[in-house]
Image (cartoon, coloured by chain):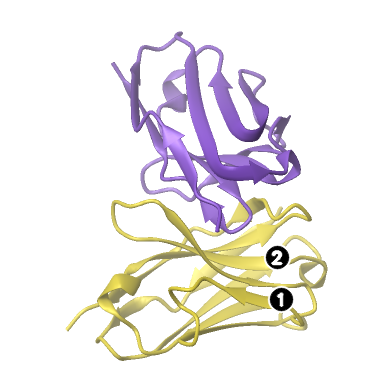
Amino acid sequence: EVQLVESGGGLVQPGGSLRLSCAASGFTFSSYEMNWVRQAPGKGLEWVSYISSSGSTIYYADSVKGRFTISRDNAKNSLYLQMNSLRAEDTAVYYCARATSAVDFDYWGQGTLVTVSS
Amino acid sequence: EIVLTQSPGTLSLSPGERATLSCRASQSVSSSYLAWYQQKPGQAPRLLIYGASSRATGIPDRFSGSGSGTDFTLTISRLEPEDFAVYYCQQRGTFGQGTKVEIK
């Protein structure tokens, strides 16, 4: 059974940093592209970042470019999102999602809540 | 950048009725990359339709997708109580704003 479990969310002050993790199991993690998608409270879905299966290709949404860094450790079956210079508008539930070859998201984690507030 | 516009914002229907949800792209997109998701309160989204018209694993056949170019449609033939939720279309890194299907 495919499982994605996020962790690392919490309350952080504006300008602070946080590192999210996503532990994958039930599939060959190193063969799949992965993404982070977020959802602000009461709002819709927003794609945040993409990483290829090898980690060699990375994309970011303009809203987080230069502040967030996606990475992965295929030996540990884990995906990460390093978030720096956090702003109030980064407050959201952050989901990791497995991508198909067509960049659909076929499996999602349960999400981890990040709250940026003083 | 492609913008996906979903309509209506809210659809009020009764169980057993047919639901028709629209997703319009600001420019032509490949059908191969158009997907639909369902999200219930407090849950992660679930992939329903990929490639505009293919049902994901385990999705009941009352859900169907169609369309091409700039206009795509998700149809729920007969609404079941568990189908009342928010639905999103997606194309690569862009999501529509969602359509809420609520009980009338």
Task: Judge whether residue A29 can be spotted in this image.
Answer: yes
- Neighbourhood count class around disc 2 (C-alpha, 10 Å): few under 14, some 14–19, many 20 upward: some
Q: What's the CA distance linking mark 2 and mark 1?
A: 7 Å
Tell me which chain appears purple: B
* Number of the label disc, if any, that sits on residue A101: none
Q: At x 45% / y 86%, what residue is drawn?
A: A67
Check whether the beta carbons of the residues at disc 2 and disc 1 lie within 8 A of each other. yes
Q: Is residue A32 above or below residue A57?
A: above
Kindly indicate which chain is depicted in yellow in the rendered structure.
A
Seen from this angle, which residue lies furthest front? B27
Of all chains, the one bearing label 2 is A
Q: Give the residue type at disc 2.
A: Ser
Amino acid residing under circle 1: Asn
Q: Are marks 2 and 1 on the same chain?
A: yes
Residue B79 visible somewhere in the drawing: no
- Residue plotted at (64% across, 53% down): A105
Q: Is residue A39 left or right of residue A31?
A: left
**Residue A54: x percent and y percent?**
80, 79
Q: Which residue is mark 1?
A: A77
Up/down of A7 relative to A25, above or below: below
Label 1: element kind = loop
**Residue name at image x 78 percent, y 61 percent:** A27
Give the residue at mark 2.
A25
Give residue B47's quadrant in the image: top right
